[in-house]
Amino acid sequence: MNCINFTVPMNPCKCGYYPDMQRCRCSQSAIERYLGRISRPLIDRIDICVEASAIAFQALNGAAKEECSADIRNRVVQAHEIQRERYREEAFCYNSQIPAARIREYCGLSKEQESRMEQLYAGLGLTARTYHKILKVARTLADMDGEAKIGDRHLNEAVCYRSLDKKFWERP
């Protein structure tokens, strides 16, 4: 089975500098109009939707110890191996491909986590598709950590990856 992952880079405004308001020359209404051309159903089909802000020059040369790309790649490869093994008897090979009918089986939550997700579902106005995406991403984050069960931190992080939905596509 061929598995395809893709990234959809996009500018957040016509000039491309938002949220850097020192450089962005677009009005708030222009930014909203620009982003409004992208439909909510399309956004629902994207697993992770995050905003990447500009990095200051000082941060590039900082002394902070960051995880190197090779280490991250190794964790991704390991997570892929975990998923391929988990789904070896299935018609799919990665968490992103879990059919909706099988979500509970592979992305099981504790009673407390289910209760929290029920509150988030209502509070954030999630769609069924977005809810399933959050669970699949949480399952992947747990795999990246080498954990058999989805933890609270995995759910929290997965929910954060949907933050742009609220910021740009769910305005009153």
Image (tube, helix red, strand yellow):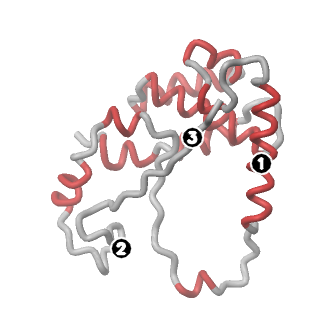
User: Is the C terminus in the top left, top right, bottom left or bottom right quadrant?
Assistant: top left
Q: Which mark is residue 4?
A: 3
Q: Secondary structure at mark 2?
A: loop
Q: Identify the residue at horizontal 79%, vertical 45% (top origin).
A: 145
Q: Quick check: marks 1 and 2 in contact, CB under 8 Å?
A: no
Q: Identify the residue at horizontal 65%, vertical 16% (top origin).
A: 104
Which residue is labeled 1 in the image? 77
Residue 43 image point, x, y percent: 38, 39
Q: Three-letter amino acid code at disc 2?
A: Asp
Residue 91 image point, x, y percent: 67, 19
Q: Nearer the viewer, mark 3 or mark 2?
A: 3
Q: How many marks?
A: 3
Q: Identify the residue at horizontal 58%, vertical 12% (top origin).
A: 101
Residue 2 vertical position relative to residue 25 in the rendered view, above or below: above
Give the mark, 3 or 2, whose residue is nearer the N terminus: 3
Q: Secondary structure at mark 1?
A: helix
Q: Secondary structure at mark 3?
A: loop
- In terms of image quadrants, where is residue 67? bottom right
Give the mark, 1 or 2, whose residue is nearer the N terminus: 2
Q: Three-letter amino acid code at disc 1?
A: Val
Does 138 sit left or right of 126 as displayed? right
Residue 87 image point, x, y percent: 75, 24
Q: Nearer the viewer, mark 1 or mark 2?
A: 1
Does 38 sit left or right of 88 as displayed? left
Which residue is labeled 2 in the image? 20
Measure the alpha-carbon separation of dots 1 and 2: 35 Å
